Amino acid sequence: MALTLRCLRCTRSFPLTLDAYLCSDCGGGGGADDAGILDVEYPPEAYKELRRRVEAGCGRADVFRWEPLLPVGGAGALTLRAGGTPLVAAPRLAAMTGVGDLLLKNETRNPTASLKDRATAVAVAIGAQLGYTDFYCASAGNAAISLAGFCANLGLGCHVFVPARTPEARLTALRAFGADLTVHPGDYDEAFAESERVGQENGWYSRNCAYNPLLVEGKKTAAFEIAEQLEWDVPDVVVAPVGDGCTLGAIGKGFRQLVDAGLTARVPRLVGVQVPAYDSVVRRFHGDTGSTAPGGDTRAVSIAVRRPRNVRRVLAEVSASGGTVVRADEGAVHEARQTLALRAGVDCEFTSAATLAAVIEHSDELDVRGKRVVLVLTGGRVDGS
Ligand SMILES: *Cc1c(COP(=O)(O)O)cnc(C)c1O
Ligand SMILES: [Zn+2]
């Protein structure tokens, strides 16, 4: 099957190769936050094959269940299995918020406790196929921990770059998994630039989902699972936190592909959530292209991104779905995490609780009353209270 890559910036198409990275025409021409991100496109046979397998009832429960719409196969990938996470009802939260049916996609149940494992599974499968022994990424913690866990399992070298504000619990997890850890004195955006410089120089394989176009394909499987868990009757609204924009962008792509495969009838409204200190995507959504987020302290450390690299992708998906991007107040995020534990029995990190905070705070604007709403609880790393 011939897959292609299309540049989200200049729209040029290239044949897909497993070592593809940024668009060679754009080559960073739009600046670090619009560097010519590529997007994988599949031929009609891939959609047909996916549908055939789904209807036949395929065996695997992890991300490689969706192999026809992935850039790499999972044959032999018996390492830590990403995906196959539960979608659970939260009736007490539904009653509290006026939402008709509130469901939690519990991504904290991944091997290293976050949705990042879905991208890592694809990264190590491709890296192994290409013969790489070393991998790198920049991260607010979860992507690095995910990569470190998978590399520990496979005996691969793992080089990670995290910002100075990374909580101690995350550094402890990275050391436990034996990662080669660089704590950059700056923020995530600076750690990202450093990781690209050092990683490319050493010829390591990139697990930077914001740049590596093949990794978003792993993340989109969260959407495939939500739809299948609801017997292909997609929810009205899907809410997820937004950092670089890969996660919600991928979820939007996943839902669109299911429509193209003839498995579902429509795409749910996508709602992205940020916090006031890191609200660049909210600003862009409202047409403000000239300013970036102020930065500073936040409990939502996993989305502390000032220059979101996949802003083009996430805004395209959000707009196509008729959705929006909102800010959740810091105090509301803190409270929402407690509420999720107390009224739904789910312990997730602050970043993920921002989804509930947004639904409570912006209930009218988001038009969620009486609707079926899925909150994507992206991670479960407990960083203290
Ligand atoms: C990385 C991450 C996000 C945001 O994902 P992006 O692809 O950067 O938008 C949200 N929640 C958690 C827990 C994460 O680790
Ligand atoms: Zn381009």
Image (spheres, grey):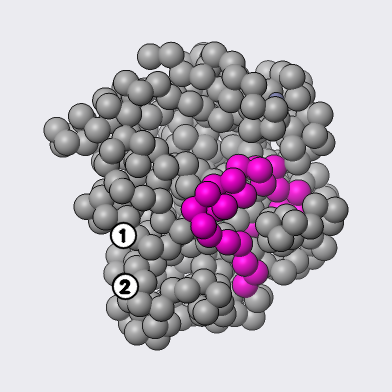
Please report whichever mark, 1 or 2, sits nearer to the chain's N-terminal start.
1
Badge 2 marks a residue whose secondary structure is strand
Q: Point out residue 285 in the picture as x, y percentages from the top left corner.
A: 68, 57
Q: Is residue 326 magenta?
A: yes
Mark 1 residue crowding within 10 angstroms, few (<14) / some (14–19) / many (20+): some
Q: Which residue is mark 1?
A: 87
Q: Which corner quadrant holds the N terminus? A: top left
Q: Residue at x 38, y 29 (%)?
A: 69
Magenta segment: 301-328
Cα distance between the residues tagged 1 and 2: 12 Å
Q: Amino acid at mark 1?
A: Leu
Q: Point out residue 26 in the picture as x, y percentages from the top left corner.
A: 75, 25
Q: Residue at x 56, y 69 (%)?
A: 354
Badge 1 marks a residue whose secondary structure is strand
Q: Nearer the viewer, residue 42 or 93?
A: 42
Indicate which disc residue 101 carries: 2
Q: Is residue 208 magenta?
A: no
